[in-house]
Image (tube, rainbow, N blue to C red):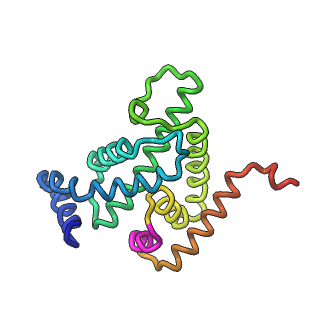
Amino acid sequence: MSPPGEITGLLADWSRGNETALDRLLPLVYDELCRLASAYMRKERSDHTLQTTALVHEAYLRLVDSPNSNYETRTHFFAVAAQVMRHVLVDHARARKRAKRGAGAPAVTLSDVALLSDDRAEEVLAVNSALEKLSEVDQRKARVFELRYFGGMSVEETATALEVSPVTVARDWRMAKAWLRRAIEPDSQHAN
């Protein structure tokens, strides 16, 4: 475990152009990135899993290659990491869906090393679509859901990342889950 502030200091050094700070950063954030990825992967069916390592590596590459890689704090970095992991999973689900429809383009990112069932790919896309709609209505609730569901963050970690109280996060989490459940469920279930 790194001393408090070390990650934040390295992020600041890296944002100022110190490339050696990036080299020192990876070993310090790798385990936490694995924890975030594992939290999401626990939701996968046991017979169809996306490899946690592949998700972590793809997310890390996107994080460090981002032109806007000015992470203010450790918490900010991991909040962005949760969002990037969501995008990696959605991109992968879309690629699986295209492949299922017979698209000729080869899958580029995780498909060589990871498995994601067709059912799970549909679920990830449905959740992503509903989450985008929720974001239009209430961006904070969408971010709470994203950090908790995709990022595996606790209520307290989410509160710190969003600079709100844990009570607010807990309330937003309940409301976001209910909103998304209604948005994803077919209308026919409510007609009976």
Q: Is residue 9 left or right of residue 155?
A: left
Q: Position of residue 86 (x, y in %)?
A: 46, 50
Q: Where is residue 111 in the image (x, y as percent from the top left)?
A: 43, 32
* Camera-side residue of 130 and 35: 35
Q: In this view, does 100 lie to the left or right of 76?
A: right
Q: Where is residue 1 in the image (x, y as percent from the top left)?
A: 23, 66
**Residue numbers of the magenta segment:** 154-162
Magenta stretch secondary structure, dominant: helix
Quadrant (top left/top right/bottom left/bottom right) for the C terminus: bottom right
| Residue 157 within the magenta-colored segment of the rendering | yes
Q: In this view, does 157 lie to the left or right of 65?
A: right
Q: Which residue is drawn at 61% across and 46% down?
A: 126
Q: In this view, does 188 lie to the left or right of 79?
A: right
Q: Residue at x 54, y 29 (%)?
A: 98
Q: In this view, does 3 lie above or below 127?
A: below
Q: Which residue is drawn at 47% across and 40% down?
A: 91
The quadrant holding residue 138 is bottom right
Q: Residue at x 44, y 24 (%)?
A: 106
Q: Position of residue 172 (x, y in %)?
A: 57, 71
* Camera-side residue of 149 and 164: 149
Q: In this view, does 145 lie above or below 186?
A: below
* Camera-side residue of 135 and 10: 10
Residue at the outermost front position: 46
| Residue 17 within the magenta-colored segment of the rendering | no
* Camera-side residue of 20 and 139: 20
